[in-house]
Image (cartoon, grey):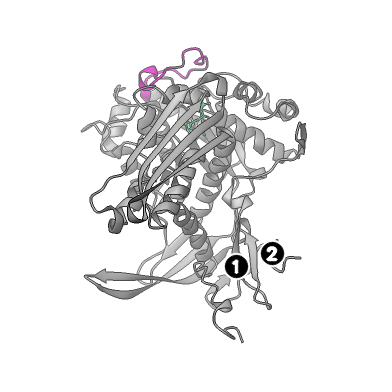
Amino acid sequence: MSRVGFVTEPLIVHSENVTYTQDEIVSEYNYLDSQVSGNVVSEVSKALTFKTSKKVPKTGILVVGWGGNNGSTLTGALLAHKHNLSWETSQGHKHPDYLGSICFSTSLKIGVNQDMHPVYCGLKDLVPMLDPKHLEVGGWDISRANLAQAVARSKVLSWEIQEKLTQHLSELEPLPSPYFPEWMPNPLPERADNLLQGTKQEILEEIRRNIRDFKTSKELEKVIVVWSANTEKNSSNYSNVNDTAQALLNAISQNRQEISVSNIFGVASVLENCIYINGSPHNIPKGLYELAETNGVPLIGDDFKSGQTKIASVMVDFLINSGLRLMSLVSYNGLGNNDTHSLSQPDTGTRELMKSQVLKAPVRDNPLIYQDLNPDHCAVMKFVPYLGDEKHTMFEFVSEIFMGGHNTIFLESNAEDSLLTAPVILDLVILTELFTRVQVKTPESQFASLHYQLGILGYLLKNSVSGEPGYSHFGQRQAILNLIRALVGLPPESFTLLEHKVTNLYT
Ligand SMILES: NC(=O)c1ccc[n+]([C@@H]2O[C@H](COP(=O)([O-])OP(=O)(O)OC[C@H]3O[C@@H](n4cnc5c(N)ncnc54)[C@H](O)[C@@H]3O)[C@@H](O)[C@H]2O)c1
């Protein structure tokens, strides 16, 4: 029998640095780092106070592209949980789960018990988090298919759960959405039967009305807008058009063609004080950042990080941090879903994967083995209709090893893309909701929110927009855990296990 402990209830930390009031958790925290000048390293200790509101607000998400594979899969899964549905498959009886969510399916070590055995708890039990069963979901789509039809069209969830969900999903209908085919690498005229028309200013105002109506009708305190529609072409930063907040607002009112659909959704969200998450690889123009920053509204992106990029970043972490010189990372991806059809067009295709930060930061951070060398990084994406949502990926990692040798690793991965992505979207929503309940101050400053781009979520996104230096896969995950630990006054997890290396440490 395992002697490892596991706590299944919400955690209460006893410490003179932590106070649980009726409404808040207040944590006095010492952020320890070092400052480096030449070869001299000096310890830096920064006193911070974190204040986390314990009241989880009634929250809703509005998904742009609600009827797509991600939007419909996530909605179906949330309703399966809410209505406690279960279903038969050829592999046996299945119940809804949260596999793939770090909030609901991962644990962390919180300490040791009297026998010096580690004790763990689920991440969700450190601080109050939104219960996905209480999440309201709505959204827009250029396709009028209701969510039951959308789930059937996506062919992701298995047949019996689709059947059981039908009565709940068929009453959910996407709101009409603007459609600017010139912005799509691969326009979808056959899908576009639910269109919001008008000038760009009129469209902006209607979307703002949609957000307000959703908030009022569901009696919500917080709304998060998630872009999960097809990838658009990138917006260049045009001078006096979208490079400042005011220029962007003017350009919308002038109906300028440089304004994309996602620009309008981003502006509408910010003006309605709603968090905006960009789940696609296309960029966000400068003016929208400025608008979000001046309005103090979180703006988070870009591009959900699910299967393929995660595997690549794990392998990069393993190889380079073992001291091997990874020189070539090539992946071949075949997939047949609607989004791949669009991503395989020349304008977005491989660029989407190439721009990923996966290799850049680890190479930059290790001049011991790279000096001026630049490893090859190539990703090929092909639209293979027969594969549907099941992504087939082959990776090849070629590294230089000891004394002029080589090591080549091939990996093959087949997985339903949206079943990997939906829990990532859920984590983004849950963690964004949490981190916007957090205020922080130094001894000299007033309480303020975390930086509006929430770079801490880099683990869940391919290109964290914040411009923060990149971290490894495990570093990015640990950053989230360590910040949540800080909110309840727990030190960063050190993994050193000194209690097993120093005699009588705890006696
Ligand atoms: N599925 C994944 O694994 C994954 C991973 C990372 C990122 N992403 C990104 O998430 C997005 C969604 O992926 P998906 O697999 O659900 O794609 P999808 O093609 O199945 O769904 C996109 C939906 O957006 C709708 N749409 C298109 N233009 C629209 C508009 N102007 N307004 C409103 N709706 C519009 C489409 O009708 C469709 O229902 C894509 O941009 C994709 O690149 C997906």
Q: Residue 417, image x and y in percent? A: 55, 33
Q: Quadrant of the N terminus?
A: bottom right
Magenta residue check for 184? yes
Q: Main secondary structure of the magenta part?
A: loop
Residue 191 position (above or below residue 86): above
Circle 2: residue type = Val
The residue positioned 68% from the left and 78% from the top of the image is: 114
Q: Amino acid at mark 1?
A: Ile
Report x, y in % for residue 265: 43, 32
Q: Which span of residues is magenta-colored?
A: 180-200
Q: Residue furthest top?
A: 190
Asked whether disc 2 touches disc 1, contact meaning CB atoms under 8 Å apart, the reply is yes
Q: Position of residue 368 (x, y in %)?
A: 29, 59
Give how far apart the Cα atoms at labels 2 and 1 are: 9 Å
Instruction: Inspect the magenta stretch and tell me whether residue 119 lies in it.
Output: no
Q: Earlier in the sequence, mark 2 or mark 1?
A: 2
Kindly identify the residue that appears in the image at 60 percent across and 46 percent down: 58
Q: Residue 302 appears in which quarter of the rendering?
A: top left
Which residue is the site of mark 1? 110
Q: Which numbered dot is residue 7?
A: 2
Ligand 1 within 8 Å, label 1 CB:
no
